[in-house]
Image (cartoon, rainbow, N blue to C red):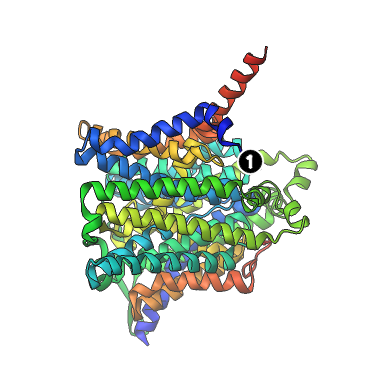
Amino acid sequence: MDIFLILTINGLATGLLLFMMACGLSIIFGLMGIMNFAHGVFFVIGAYASTWTYALTGSFAVAMLAGIAAGAAIGWLTEITIIRPVYKNPIGQILITLGAFIVINELIKMIWGPNVIASPTPDLLQGEVNILGASISIYRIFIIVFSCLVALVVQLALTKTRLGMIVRAGVENAEMVNILGVNVRRVFALVFILGTGLAALGGTMIGPTMGQIGPFLSSQYLLLGFIVVVIGGMGSFIGSMVAGIIVGLANNYIIWLYPPAAMPLNIILMSVILLVKPTGLMGIKEAV
Amino acid sequence: MLTTKSWLKSPAAWLILAALILLAVLPLVNSSRFVLNMASSIAIAAIFAVSYNLLCGFTGVFSLGHAVFFGSSAYIIGIIMNRLGASPWFFLLATVLAIILAVLLGLFVGYLALRLKAIYYAMVTFAVAELFVITADKWREMTGGQDGLLFQVPSFLAGKFAAYYTVIILFVAVVFFMYRFLDSPTGKILVAIRENETRASALGFNVLRYKLLSNAVAGILACFAGIAYAVLNQFVMPNILDVNQTIGALLMTIVGGMGTLAGPVIGATFITLFGDWLARLAKLHPLLERWPIIFGLLYIIIILTMPGGIMSGYYKLKFWWSRSKQK
C-alpha cells in the first residue's frame, strides 16, 4: 500500500510538470496553429537557469523566477525573430521551430557544457513526511501544490480576464477575432511568451527530482509533451492537465514494474488515442 | 523526357558525366582511406537525403522518423553479421529482411498516421523513432546498447575499394531510379498531391494510397543508405536511429533545395564537407566544438531568406541567362 502511495505521489508530481510543459504547446497550437518543436528546449532553459541561479544565490524562489524570466525572454525573442515570418506557412513553422530547437540546444551546451550537472534540492524542501506509513518527499508535495496553484491561476486568467477571453475565442476562430478589431499578433506574442514561460517554470522544478539535469532532457520532454498534447487534445488547457496526470501516473507505475517499458507504453497510449479519438480526450481542433 | 541527343547538349548532362567519371577514377587518383571514406560518407548522406526528399520535397509529407529506416537496416545487417557470421548468403538474407522491414514499417506507420494533419504525422514519427532508439539502447544482448555493435561484412565487400565502389554504385542507382520515378506518372501524381491534396483527391486519385507508396519507396531507398552505412563503417550505434539523423537529412535537403533531384545531393556534399571542416576546427578552440549551431543558424537563415535552397539560386541564374540570351 505504501509503495502504491509513493508511486502515486511521484506520478502526480511528474504529471503536473508534464502538464506545465504541455499546456503551452497545446494553447500555442490551438491559438496560433503552430506546433512548437522547440518547446522542449524552453523546459531545459528553465532547468539550467534555475539551477545556475540557485547555486549563485541560494534562494529557490529567486531561481524559479530567473527560470521563468529566461524562458519567457528567449520565447519572446524566438517569436519576434523567426516565428513571425512564418505565420501563414505551416511547413515553414515545423522547419523553423526545429531550427530553433537545434540552435538553442547547442547554445545551452555551449554555456553549461554537454554533460549533466548536479541540481540539489533546496534545504527548505528537503526531507520526507510520513503519510499513512509511507515516507513521501516534501519536494514532490511542493511540486504538486505549487503546480496546482499555477494551473488555477492560469485557468482563472483564461476564463475571467479579457485577454483570456480573447485567447479562448482565438482558439475557436482566430480570423474572426482579428476581424473584431483585436490585435491578434500581440495576443499571439503574449501567448507564446506565456507558453514558453510555463514550460520553463516546469523546467525549474525538474532538477531536484532527479538530482541532475542535462541537455538530453529537451528532446525527451518534447516527446512527452507531444504525447500529453495528443492525448489531452490540441488547444485544451484542462485536457493537457488530465493527460499530463495520466501519463505521469502511468509512467511511474510502469517504471516500478519494468523500467524500459515506460516510454513505449506512453507512445502506444498516444497511438491508441490517435486511432480511436484523433481529437484527443478534450480537443477542439480536428486532427484529420 | 528528353531525347538522348538534346540531353547531351545541356550543360547539366556534362556536369553529371564528369562527376560520374570522377567518382569512378577517384580511387586511382587518391586511394587514401580518408578520401575514400569521405566520398563514401557523402554518397551515403546523399542517398539518405534523396530518399527523404521524396517524402518531404515531392509528396509534402513531413516525417521526423526517417532515420528509423536507415538505422534499422544498418542494425539488421549488424546483428545478422554478428550473430550468424559474415557469409555472403547471410548478407543477402539481411538485405532482404531490411527491405521487408522498411516496407512493412512504412506501410504500417503510414496507414495509422498519414490520414492525420502534417503536424500530427511529424509528432507520431518522432515518437516511433524514439521507440526504436529506446529498443536499440535497452536490448543490450542483441544491439550492444550505447556501446554500439561491431561486426564484419562478407570479405568481398570488406576491402577499401570494394566498400567504396559498393557505396558509389548504390548511390548512382538510387539517383537514377529517382530520376525515372519522378518522371513516371506516379511521380507526377505525388507532386500533384503536394501542391493541392484536395484537388488531387477530387481528380480521383487515392491520396492515402499514393502517400503510402511514397512512404514505402522512400523507406526502401533509406534502407539502402543504411546498408551502405553498415558496409562502410562495420559499426552501428543507437544515435543513427534518432531524430537528429533525420534533421540532418532535412538540413541537407533544405540547403540543397527541397523538391529538386539534385538539391539533396548538393546539400549532402556541402554539409558533409563543411561539417568535417568545422569538426576539425573544433580542435582549435573549445567554443567551436559546438559547431552544429552554425548549421542551425544557416538552416534558419535559408528557410527565412531562400526557401528554395541552392538549387533555386541555380534556376534563377539559368532563367536570367536564357532571358539575356534571347535579347
Residue B190 visible within the image: yes
- Whether residue A30 sits left or right of residue A199 in the image: it is right
Disc 1 is placed on an element classified as loop
Who's the residue at 56% across and 74% down the image?
A272
Residue A226 lies, in percent from the top left, at 51, 60
Who's the residue at 68% across and 56% down the image?
A160
Residue B322 lies, in percent from the top left, at 62, 20
Residue placed under numbered mark 1 in the picture = A87
- Whether residue A230 sits left or right of residue A63 in the image: it is right
Comparing B247 with B249, the one in front is B249
Residue A287 visible within the image: no
Who's the residue at 44% across and 36% down the image?
B266
> How many numbered callouts?
1
Using the rendered view, name the quadrant where residue B22 is placed. top left
* Mark 1 closeness class: few <14, some 14–19, many ≥20 residues within 10 Å: some
Above/below status of A256 relative to A163? below
Comparing A250 with A219, the one in front is A219
Above/below status of B195 relative to A81? below
Using the rendered view, name the quadrant where residue A14 is placed. bottom left
Residue type at the position of mark 1: Tyr
The subunit carrying tag 1 is: A
Residue B268 lies, in percent from the top left, at 40, 40
Residue A229 lies, in percent from the top left, at 56, 62
Who's the residue at 51% across and 67% down the image?
A244
